[in-house]
Amino acid sequence: MKITEAFVAEILKNEYPKDFQKVYDNSPMLQYLDKKMKAVHGNSKTRRSLANIYAIYSILYFYQDDFYEKKEQYRRFDGYDYMRLFNFYRGLYGGSKLQNHALNSRVNGEFHNKIKDAVNDLIIINNGKYLIHIDYIYVAGHDISKVSCKIIKRYVELLMAKDHALISILEELRRLTDYSEKKAKINALLTEDAEARIFEIISYAILKNHYKNVTVFFGYTRDTIDEVALELFKTGRTNANDGGIDFVMRPVGRFFQVTEVNNYDKYLLDIDKIMHFPISFVIKTKQSKKRVLADLEQYIAQRSSGMAVLEERYRKAIEEIITINELQTWTDELKNNDIDGIIRDIDIYYKLEMNMDAEDDEE
């Protein structure tokens, strides 16, 4: 069985030079962790899965001190208290916002999904106490708890390095005095293989600073009509359950959803979630907006099976298509102070996403 991640293979080879492959082939837990660590790649579309990974790590962390290579003692153990585990993994990198779902059920459900031949649950749940099933700790004569923790720690280190790479780019952008160069570097961040949440944050910063230069006339009566600049607001963290609304605009009431071009079924699902209210899609693609719209309308026609009421419902719900091309064009058109605003907004919302202290001083 092929080990997916190079760093996983390296750690296993160092730990078990002669039988690392045998250990991996016979370890459902290692296979599961390996499958869950694709987020280390720059173009990964997967979530970081920190909740599930930290649920496993928190149990193994305490197990190492208490029961490493003490098989018979561990057989009589009834589990670690929930609050001890929960407080521990909430203190880990990126863990402060994690909930308790992973400990309670999510790991076991996904574990069986990914590892089809696994018989037992990975985590035993015992009236508010939790422990890893012994079958997954002892593999080919080895207690693999320590090597599993090494793999998880390395995964987190790689994520941290990746997270801080954008911070370094922002520092470089601040030091530049040539605004043409600043624009070029911001546009270079907008790629089809950019990480989903980084693309969402950068696209928000560009749209916010683009729309604030657009004004509308708004009022409840003729006497109260006033010229107002458009304001764009981000609804929350990038992995929030926001019901298909990533950004909202005042005062005109527009909804924006950031997505990718590869799954049109999700577009319709997002439209359904907000009861067919018009929505603007911000799409991580270099295809033209005309091409994307044509493909989306063709998909709607196929899904609707020619039923006019369904076709009209979905077509009317597509307010605008915005691609990387529009985002880059609008960046090039912005004034110098708006470019600095983009850099500041990326810094604020990225550090919020990473639970870092942001420099949120507004001019």
Image (tube, helix red, strand yellow):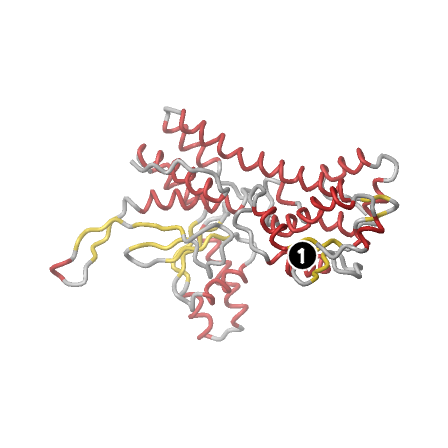
Picture residue at 35% right of the left edge, 45% below the top: 208
Q: Quadrant of residue 359?
A: top left
Q: Position of residue 258 (x, y in %)?
A: 47, 52
Q: Position of residue 217 (x, y in %)?
A: 20, 55
- Image-based side of 49 in relation to 181, left or right: right
Q: Closest to the observer: 26 or 134?
A: 134
Which amino acid, mark 1?
A: Val
Q: Closest to the observer: 160 or 296?
A: 160
Quarter of the image that includes the C terminus: top left
Q: Closest to the observer: 36 or 263?
A: 36
Q: Is residue 250 above or below residue 277?
A: above
Q: Residue furthest left?
A: 223
For the image shown, how many numbered marks are present on the structure?
1
Picture residue at 50% right of the left edge, 64% below the top: 268
- Image-based side of 360 in relation to 213, left or right: right
From the image, tell me which residue sits under label 1: 107
- Mark 1: which secondary structure? helix
Picture residue at 64% right of the left edge, 60% below the top: 104
Q: Position of residue 302 (x, y in %)?
A: 54, 68
Picture residue at 50% right of the left edge, 35% below the top: 166
Q: Position of residue 20 (x, y in %)?
A: 83, 40
